[in-house]
Image (cartoon, helix red, strand yellow):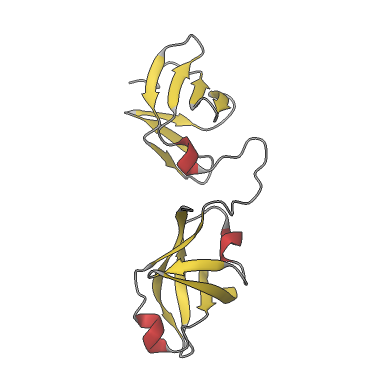
Amino acid sequence: MAKNVRVGRIAGAHGLKGELKVEVLTDFVERLDVGRRLLLAGQWTTVESAHLHSGRLLLKLAGIDDVDAAKSMLWQYLEAPEDERPELDEDEYVTADLVGMEVVTLEGETIGKIDDVLLMPAQDIFVVGKIMIPAVKQFVKSVDLANRRIVVELIEGMRD
């Protein structure tokens, strides 16, 4: 059975024709493009329109045609098939793939596993226990998805 991933959450209704205010939960906003299939409240639907309004994504989904139907979806999650991932560049990764990966130093010392990835404006941050590692080439030397291993170089003070 195909797995789905959360790509958005309904944060409110907009207007009278069933548009939904959506909190985007994915780096790949193209998963919310017109024509895409999404799972909402256990039912598959299709994106009929998508646009930004006051910094918020507004979606019109098939089958949600009035304000009452839109309001009934408040706080529901939108899911997309996981296998419909966009192509990634060489140094791009899906956050869900990184969580749980083993982190070791250049010297081979195991630091732990990635507990979380914080999405920050300047760069993402790998959280390994109490250690926070900026996801930049200065610190992250290699990412091996196949073997679920990340090699890092820490500087003095990063472990404290």
Q: Quadrant location of residue 13?
A: bottom left
Residue 94 seen from this side: yes
**Rendering coords of residue 34 (x, y %):** 62, 72
Count numbered badges in the picture: 0
Q: Is residue 53 visible?
A: no
64 up-or-down from 111: above or below: below
User: In the image, residue 86 lies at what x, y percent?
Assistant: 63, 51
- Is 41 above or below relative to 102? below
- Would you say 37 lies left or right of 100 here? right
Q: Residue at x 53, y 43 (%)?
A: 94
Q: Quadrant of the C terminus?
A: top left
Q: Position of residue 70 (x, y in %)?
A: 41, 82
Answer with left or right where residue 146 lies relative to residue 91. Answer: left
Q: Nearer the viewer, residue 95 or 160?
A: 95
Indicate whether 17 appears above or below 5. Answer: below
Q: Residue at image x 43%, y 25%?
A: 102
Within the image, what quadrant is residue 72 found in?
bottom left
Residue nearest the observer in this picture, 54 or 8: 8
Residue furthest to the front: 1
Which residue is found at the position 60% from the left and 39% from the top? 92
- Residue at 56%, 31% (x, y): give it: 136
Q: Position of residue 116 (x, y in %)?
A: 39, 38
